[in-house]
Amino acid sequence: QVQLVESGGGLVQAGGSLRLSCAPSRRIFSINAMGWYRQAPGKQRELVATITSGGGTNYADSVKGRFTISRDIAKNTVYLQMNSLNPEDTAVYYCNVDISWPKGNYWGQGTQVTVSS
C-alpha cells in the first residue's frame, strides 16, 4: 500500500501562484507515471497534468501555458507549479501515482485550492 502526502494548497487571489507537492510514504522504484487531477464542486474529477517515468508530460488544455508539472526522482516527489490562477481553477487537487510492480494506482487525500476574484 502506498500513501501519497500532498501539500501546498490554499487561498490565492486571481493572477497569483501556488505550488503543489506530492510524495509517497515510502520509496517506489517502478513508477509508470505521476500526475495531478482536480475536482470542482458538482463536477467530475479531471486530469490536470501527468508526467511519465521518461519525463513526458501531458496537460489539460485549460492549464497549458500556466501550469508546469515536474518531478524530483531522488525524492520521488512530483510538483505542480500553478501560475496565473483564475477562479475556474478552484477545486480539490489530487495526486495520483501509477506503479508497474507491484501493479497499483494510488490517490492522495486531496488539497484544496481556492482562487478568489
Image: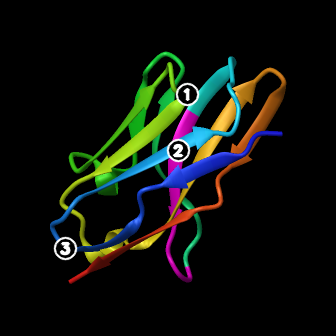
Query: Which residue shows up at 42% across the image and 63% down it?
Result: 9
Mark sitting earlier along the chain (3/1): 3
Tell me the amino acid under the disc marked 1: Asn
Say whether disc 3 or disc 2 marks the residue closer to the N-terminus.
3
Compared to residue 110, the image places residue 42 above or below, namely below
Classified by dominant secondary structure, the portion drawn in magenta counts as strand
Residue at 64% of width from left, 24% of height from top? 31
Q: CA distance from mark 1 to mark 2?
A: 9 Å
Nearer the observer, 93 or 22: 22
**Which residue carries the number 1 mark?**
76
The crowd level at tag 2 (other Cα within 10 Å; few <14, some 14-19, many 20+) is many
**Residue holding disc 2:** 22
Figure quadrant of the C terminus:
bottom left
> What residue span does the magenta drawing correspond to?
34-42
Q: Which image quadrant: the N terminus?
A: top right
Q: Secondary structure at mark 3?
A: loop
Direction from residue 22 to residue 114 in the image, left or right: left
Q: Quadrant of residue 72?
A: top left
